[in-house]
Image (tube, grey):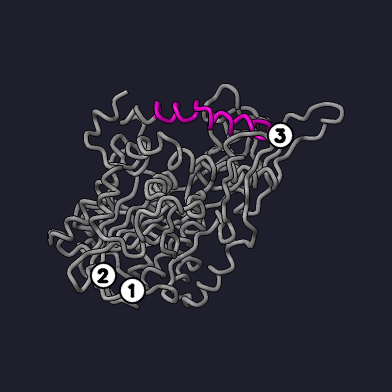
Amino acid sequence: MKTLAKFTVVLAGVALLSLSAINSANASESPQSSWLTVRAAAPGPIAAGYVFDDSEYSYCNPRYPTSQTYSAVPDAQLQFVQTIVRHGDRTPVHLIPNDENTWTCDGIEEDIYLHAAGEPEKNNTGSFQQVIEIPSWNKKFGFANQVWRGTCESGQLTDHGKLQHRTLGAHLRSIYVDKLGFLSKTLNRTSEVYARTTYIWRTKNSAESLLGSLWPDRGLSPSAAIPIHTYPSQIETMYGNSNACPKIKSIVADITSSDSYQGFLKEQGPLMARLAGIFGVDSKGDSDWRDTWDGYFDILNARQCHGMELPCSHTPGSGKEAAPKCATADDAKQTSKNSHYEIALKYRDHPLSQNLTRLVIGSLWGTLKEQLEDHIAGKAGDLKFALYSGHDSTIIPLLGSLRASNRNMLWPPYASNLVFELWKKSDGNRVIRVIYNGQVLKLQDENQWCDLGACPIDTFFSHVDDFIPTDISAQCAR
């Protein structure tokens, strides 16, 4: 199957935007706010002193790398770039009944057609478009009351999400093509790029959008098509695959049952119970709503990013409680704080974090390391740029295993981008630079294992090796 993304005037215009205009928009995307300190009145995990600097944080939009702020590693030559991204803005993954919001995803069309491999003019089926249809709820048959109104599937990349990756691709082009001359101005050999996504459609559309701006105007011939590689879901390694690796569930269960985590849940229990009542979910019996803030974070933040009303309950009480209860902006803010704390505890700070992260993302670390080793050994051929389009659940464990600072362990915004650059110094030594959302990744004050502005490759590999499984089958056994 061949997939062609047809961008309407709205998206096509991104390629025509001046980078100064993009930078200006980027600078205004992050709300100004102060340091956030999450504390508890009674002893508990949050009271221990987690301080999150969110002064440049916006969940809705990432910070992009820009040619204006980018500089090369001194006295070195760039050899290879790996870019791991989170998909762009999407509709919520978690559904709540009787949702009255309207989500539209039909401003950017995607044409699909089938043809014999390598021969688009033969056995061509003609083009098709998939249309998401959500009928009006008639209260008699069907299940339309279980989802919102509009033209979007749950977890679908929105038009804005595609635009975010078009913008990111334009910035990467301004750095690696225009400024450094590292990547080809015109992609004549697709062997110069490797692209991989998960099987989930929003990561594929994100990759298409990014690559479409990194190398625009490539045409539609089979020779110009960039292969996008996808693992079957049963063996996916770009997020925690608990079906293939049952041990992940048991480690998560051990973390969530620990005193520190249970103290955290107890401390924030009233808010969780309140939101569960509004959303109509079970925070007592269902572990997806009892043991994690993930679903609450998703429901609230996805709507806030689109300026939508936050959910209200559809089962009003009586007397003083007669009016429906609604989630508030303060609820969303505290939910975000709780979610930041949760991912830092699970993937960086708990005694079991290293074991969890090794099984969740260690196989991907192994893949990334092998690519870097191939370049060092001169076995990479034409390959200069690798793109891995994944999820927040891809970025979070990578950051945790790198021991990212609290500022960088906030929940990854849509279209977050984590870049590994391989440089060769004039003395022959190689270094890795790690850039996260436009800035060199900073580490925890107490865990400065390397300067990621130019980390010696042996030091980098030694750290990463601690998170790569030695026998994944044995380590994943229950």
Q: Which residues are magenta?
A: 249-272
Q: Position of residue 98 (x, y in %)?
A: 65, 35
Q: Mark 3 belongs to which amino acid? A: Ser
Quadrant (top left/top right/bottom left/bottom right) for the C terminus: top left
Q: Residues within 10 Å of mark 1 (few under 14, many from 20)?
A: few
Q: Which mark is residue 99?
A: none
**Secondary element at image label 1:** loop
Q: Position of residue 173 (x, y in %)?
A: 36, 71
Q: Position of residue 54 (x, y in %)?
A: 58, 56
User: For the residues marked 3 and 1, what is the alpha-carbon distance in whole angstroms?
Assistant: 53 Å
Q: Position of residue 278 (x, y in %)?
A: 68, 34
In this view of the protein, which residue sits in the foreground, 266 or 118?
A: 266
User: For the residues marked 1 and 2, what is the alpha-carbon distance in whole angstroms?
Assistant: 8 Å
| Mark toward the start of the polypeptide (1 vs 2) | 1
Q: Which residue is mark 3?
A: 313
**Secondary element at image label 2:** strand
Q: Is residue 149 visible?
A: no
Q: Which residue is mark 2?
A: 78
In this view of the protein, which residue sits in the foreground, 267 or 287?
A: 267
Asked whether, in this view, residue 225 is left or right of residue 40, the answer is left
Residue at far front of view = 446
Q: Residues within 10 Å of mark 2 (few under 14, many from 20)?
A: some
Residue at the spot 26% in from the left edge and 38% down from the top edge: 469
* Residue 263 part of the magenta-drawn span: yes
Secondary structure predominantly adopted by residues drawn in magenta: helix
Q: Which residue is mark 1?
A: 72
Q: Mark 2 belongs to which amino acid? A: Leu
| Mark toward the start of the polypeptide (3 vs 1) | 1
* Residue 242 part of the magenta-drawn span: no
